[in-house]
Image (spheres, helix red, strand yellow):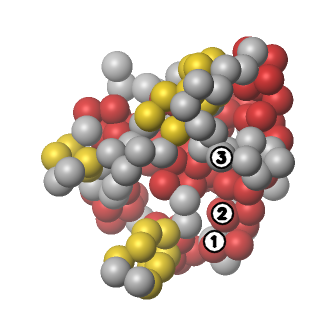
Amino acid sequence: MNISEQGKSLIKGFEKCKLKAYKVTPDGRWTIGWGSESYADGRSVKEGDVITQEEADILFDMTIGRYESIVRDNVKRNVKQNEFDALTSFAYNCGAGYKSGNTWTKYNIWDKATRNVPADEMIPYWQSLCITSNKKPMPGLVRRRKSEVHLYVFGELDFFE
């Protein structure tokens, strides 16, 4: 399964395309285009980089596969298209896991998706996952998680403006 146009719209709706590199994280990483931290050849985005809209779109299409793979590798059941799209959006934004000390830990979202937990468990869990920066909830991340889990559970795209 691959991400649908609806899934791409979800990601792009939150990432917003920037044609000039900008710092997005407190740790100083740079992004460009539709939120890419690196180019298809593996080079990291750096200060001063500029691309065209066409290059941004091509970069997105060339790199989305790595996030689809995170979903395929971590969810051990057949999912519906809307579920795959929502999970791919989450992976695009957060990756497969997080580093705690020297250890990488996978997010529990993959296990919950594999077990197909009911909506009443999945909705509050997803809406609280990876929404903070410096221990403060970020409104854009709160909206993104709400939109992702809405698509996952109800099959409908809503940006909750």
Residue at image mark 1:
75
Q: What amino acid is found at the position of numbered circle 3 in the picture? A: Ser
Residue lying at the far bottom of the rendered structure: 103
Query: Going 41% across and 73% down the picture, which residue do you hit?
Result: 99
Q: Is residue 99 left or right of residue 57?
A: left
Q: Secondary structure at mark 3?
A: loop
Q: What amino acid is found at the position of numbered circle 1 in the picture? A: Val
| 100 vs 46, nearest the viewer | 46
Q: Quadrant of the N terminus?
A: bottom right
User: Pointer 1 and pointer 2: residues touching (CB < 8 Å)?
Assistant: yes
Q: Secondary structure at mark 1?
A: loop
Residue lying at the far top of the rendered structure: 53
Q: What amino acid is found at the position of numbered circle 2 in the picture? A: Val
> From this viewpoint, is residue 116 visible?
no
Front position among marks 1 and 3 = 3
Residue at image mark 3:
44
x, y percent for residue 132: 26, 49
How packed mark 3 is, by other alpha carbons closer than 10 Å (few <14, some 14-19, many 20 or more), is: some
Q: CA distance from mark 1 to mark 2?
A: 6 Å
Residue at image mark 2:
71
**Label 2 vs 3, first from the N-terminus:** 3
Compared with 35, 77 (above or below) is below
Q: CA distance from mark 1 to mark 3?
A: 28 Å
User: Pointer 2 and pointer 3: residues touching (CB < 8 Å)?
Assistant: no
Compared with 50, 71 (above or below) is below
Residue lying at the far front of the rendered structure: 48
Tag shown at residue 120: none
Front position among marks 2 and 3 = 3
Q: Secondary structure at mark 2?
A: helix
How packed mark 2 is, by other alpha carbons closer than 10 Å (few <14, some 14-19, many 20 or more), is: many
Query: Going 63% across and 39% down the picture, which residue do you hit?
Result: 45
